[in-house]
Image (tube, grey):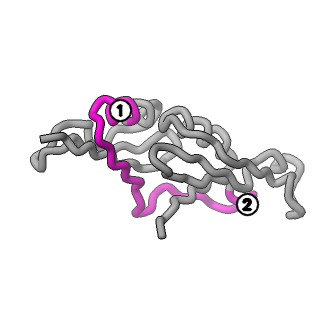
């Protein structure tokens, strides 16, 4: 069993999906729009993402959608997405891409436990932690 994060957005899920695809060097495996389903949907919501899947790294997955129209999306929760990496340069590249337009809450740097670690909130309000095991 492997948990898969499911991120909900309030109308900008496709923008977020493409941002994460670029930042994580991922591949979009599936997109379903509200207009593709039998669910009743306002005309302006038919092109919004009902469900999508992004695969990246070594079999990692994130699912992304626009919440049903009118639902509230909060980024003030207690969840952070954590990525464990093994290459410092790749860690820095991903960190910098995710930080574009967002806010770094802890700069990426070598930590007392020996790894390179940093935290940020991206431009969509999603919180991330990146940790790179430094080879000894």
Could you say where residue 95 lies in the image, as x and y percent from the top left?
37, 36
Could you say where residue 135 lies in the image, as x and y percent from the top left?
17, 40
Find disc 1 in the rendering and name its residue. 90
Label 2 element class: loop
For this view, does 29 lie left or right of residue 6?
A: right
Q: Residue at x 33, y 49 (%)?
A: 84
Residue 70 sits above or below residue 121 on the image:
below
Q: CA distance from mark 2 to mark 1?
A: 35 Å
Residue 101 sits above or below residue 65 on the image:
above
Q: Residue at x 29, y 36 (%)?
A: 87
For this view, does 73 lie left or right of residue 112?
A: right
Residue 86 colored magenta? yes
Say if mark 2 contacts mark 1, CB within 8 Å: no
Q: What's the magenta region?
A: 67-94
Label 1 element class: helix
Q: Residue at x 35, y 32 (%)?
A: 90
Find disc 2 in the rendering and name its residue. 68
């Amino acid at each position: 069993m492997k948990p898969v994060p499911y991120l909900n957005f309030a109308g900008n899920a496709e923008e977020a999906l493409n941002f994460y695809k670029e930042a994580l060097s991922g591949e979009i495996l599936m997109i379903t729009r509200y207009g593709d389903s039998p669910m009743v949907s306002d005309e302006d919501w038919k092109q919004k993402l009902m469900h999508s899947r992004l695969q990246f790294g070594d079999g990692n997955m994130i699912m992304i959608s626009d919440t049903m129209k009118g639902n509230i999306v909060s980024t003030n929760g207690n969840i952070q997405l954590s990525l464990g990496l093994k290459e410092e340069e790749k860690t820095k590249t991903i960190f910098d891409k995710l930080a574009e337009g967002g806010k770094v809450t802890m700069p990426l740097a070598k930590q007392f436990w020996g790894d390179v670690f940093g935290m940020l909130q991206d431009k969509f309000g999603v919180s991330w932690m990146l940790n790179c095991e430094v080879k000894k």
